Amino acid sequence: MSSAWNRTGLWLIVGLLVLGLGAAFVLLRPDEPDGGPASSTDDIVESATAVTQEVSAAVASEARLPAEDATILSGDDRSPQLEALTRGWNTNWGRRTIDTSALLSGGPPRDGIPSIDQPQFVGVEQAAAWLAGNEPVIALEINGDARAYPLQILTWHEIANDTVGGVPVVVTFCPLCNAALTFDRRLGAEVLEFGVSGLLRNSDLIMYDRTTESLWQQFTGEGVIGDLAGEQLAFLPSSLVSFADFRAAYPKGQVLSRETGASRPYGRNPYEGYDTIGSNPFLYRGPMDGRLQAVERVVTVSLADEGIDIAYPLSVLSAVGVIQESRGGRDLAVFHRSGTSSALGAETIAEGQDVGATGVFDALLDGRKLTFQVQEEEIVDAETGSSWNILGQATGGPLQGRQLEPVVHGNHFWFSWAAFKPDTIVYQD
């Protein structure tokens, strides 16, 4: 092992111990089972809201979806170690889509990393007193309700159960995979509440719902063990952007408060150095896809209907600012904007390396395909000369106030995406 990984591993273990409130947690051994004229900002937000309402309605109508190619297995195949670890759980281990040998303990027990179940919010001006402009936040807007979930908080909680614009949602962040994903937490007529199970698969967070105690893979939104194995949560389009970008786009937006009911050193990163290129992912035992470095950042898109998965290396995207291509009948526009720090580099998140933010959108607006390029650090469309922000809002020019349709995407480490999506197409310039 390199000295860099030794330091990273130390911080990871320290962070996990802190997350577990000082309890005596035991990591399982490697052989044991255990992510024109300017209009007002209000006009921009109003137009963006209309598009989001349409997206929300479509998602809500499909909130109960079958998991892709889910094969239901029967029988409880837990090892004695995993059985001891999960003693007292009411999970139906006899119904599953995976072998339980793929599960590892992350250290803290179930709910040792506490989810946020009664989130409190403050306005952007109040949040600016403790949240730096370059810090990453998960931006989510539904039916005119715009909210930001800072990673300085979610790093310590990983799950926030909330209702946004009338839609029950679960906002998630797995630090080990750098996976920030948002789901509709309705399943038919049932609204689920999620917690942190303490288990990992491919280094990724395994969630559990508190109704059936089924286990869910954060990376895919699929129920993998329990009564709800084979069910699929609906992804919601959200973005990982800087607080400054969120604040500019949604001046009346709300920010998750530090008043979580838990005492944590918010703003500190317990995984210092984890995103160093060349380091090995923590508690990952699967094969490595050598097309990219393990913790190289990629912007990812899954076109499920077409069976196409695409990864855009951030190293390529950041150099050009915009990538446009047609895949599976979709005209995609992938944006990059600098100014967002890594949450997994420096000890203090606000001092992390600038990795930038991304957005993915349908390039069609009113049936017309727009062509984007970077001009003097602004994203501009060639057809009208309008300028666009990282959240797909036109902020100047003839189209000011319009909103591009967001495409569900992620900003992940390559190893984790490749583990779940091995047939991914890697974009090459």
Image (tube, rainbow, N blue to C red):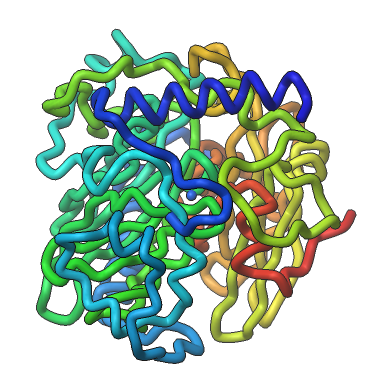
Q: Position of residue 125 (x, y in %)?
A: 26, 16
Residue 189 seen from this side: yes
| Position of 60 relative to 88 (above/below) | below
Q: Residue at x 58, y 37 (%)?
A: 357
- Image quadrant containing the C terminus: bottom right
Quadrant assignment, res 358:
top right
Q: Who is closer to the viewer here, 382 or 11?
A: 11
Q: Residue at x 15, y 68 (%)?
A: 90
Left or right of 18 in this view: 390: right
Residue sitting at the far front: 80
Q: Who is closer to the viewer here, 376 or 354?
A: 354
Left or right of 191 in this view: 318: right
Q: Who is closer to the viewer here, 108 or 56?
A: 108
Q: Position of residue 62 (x, y in %)?
A: 30, 81
Left or right of 68 in this view: 287: right
Q: Residue at x 20, y 63 (%)?
A: 209
Quadrant assignment, res 261:
top left
Residue sitting at the far top: 129
